[in-house]
Image (cartoon, grey):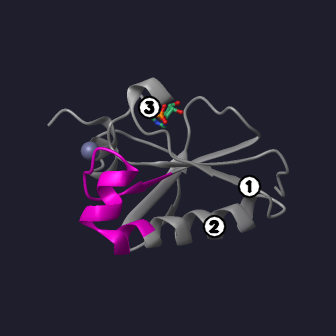
């Protein structure tokens, strides 16, 4: 399957990793829309967050835990976690991922 986030998970495409957990990895968004813009991505391929929630709820909880830990590390604690779901909602990469965004960076 030609999936850019599977390639990042597999190490075929380089990225700026900022965190890892059992089920998830986190890296900086290549085109940040806020001072903090981190993507949290399940290691397993699922097309969007809804599919992930039904197929592997434990991996979704792990993703939210990793994202909130990083939000606390990189920002003052106020953040958004966004899952664009479907092309009409702005989803462009069809491997589930959450956007951690914040405009109150800590470092
Ligand atoms: P979405 O539009 O919700 O599917 O989000 C996809 C996000 O992935 C966008 O914010 C892109 O900037 C980001 N993105 C695409 N390719 C890469 C990459 N190679 N490394 C980091 N972020 C990427
Ligand atoms: Zn994938």
CB atoms at circles 2 and 1 under 8 Å apart? yes
First reached walking from the N terminus: tag 2 or tag 1: 2
In the image: residue 49, left or right of residue 66 = left
Name the side, left or right, on which 55 lies relative to 8: left
- 98 or 84: nearer the viewer: 84
Ligand 2 occupies quarter: top left
Label 3 lies in ligand 1 vicinity (Cβ under 8 Å): yes
Mark toward the start of the polypeptide (2 vs 3): 2
Screen quadrant of the C terminus: bottom right
Say which element carries label 2. Answer: helix
Q: Mark 1 points at which residue?
A: 79
Q: Which mark is residue 68?
A: 2
Q: Residues within 10 Å of mark 1 (few under 14, many from 20)?
A: many
Instruction: Report the magenta residues as a range.
Output: 40-60
Residue for point 74% across, 59% down: 74
Residue 89 at x, y = what percent? 49, 30
Q: Kindly identify which residue carries mark 3.
A: 91
Q: Residue at x 25, y 51 (%)?
A: 45
Secondary structure found at label 1: loop
Does 6 sit left or right of 60 as displayed? left
Sequence-wise, which precedes: disc 1 or disc 3? 1
Q: Which of 95 and 83 is in front in this view?
A: 83
């Amino acid at each position: 399957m030609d999936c850019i986030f599977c390639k990042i998970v597999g190490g075929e495409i380089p990225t700026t990793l900022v965190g890892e957990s059992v089920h998830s990895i986190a890296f900086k968004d290549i085109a940040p829309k806020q001072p903090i813009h981190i993507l949290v991505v399940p290691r397993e391929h699922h097309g969007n967050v809804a599919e992930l929630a039904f197929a592997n709820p434990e991996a979704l909880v792990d993703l939210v835990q990793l994202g909130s830990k990083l939000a606390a590390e990189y920002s003052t604690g106020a953040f958004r976690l966004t899952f664009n779901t479907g092309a009409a909602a702005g989803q462009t990469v069809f491997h589930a991922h959450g956007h951690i965004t914040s405009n109150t960076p800590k470092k």
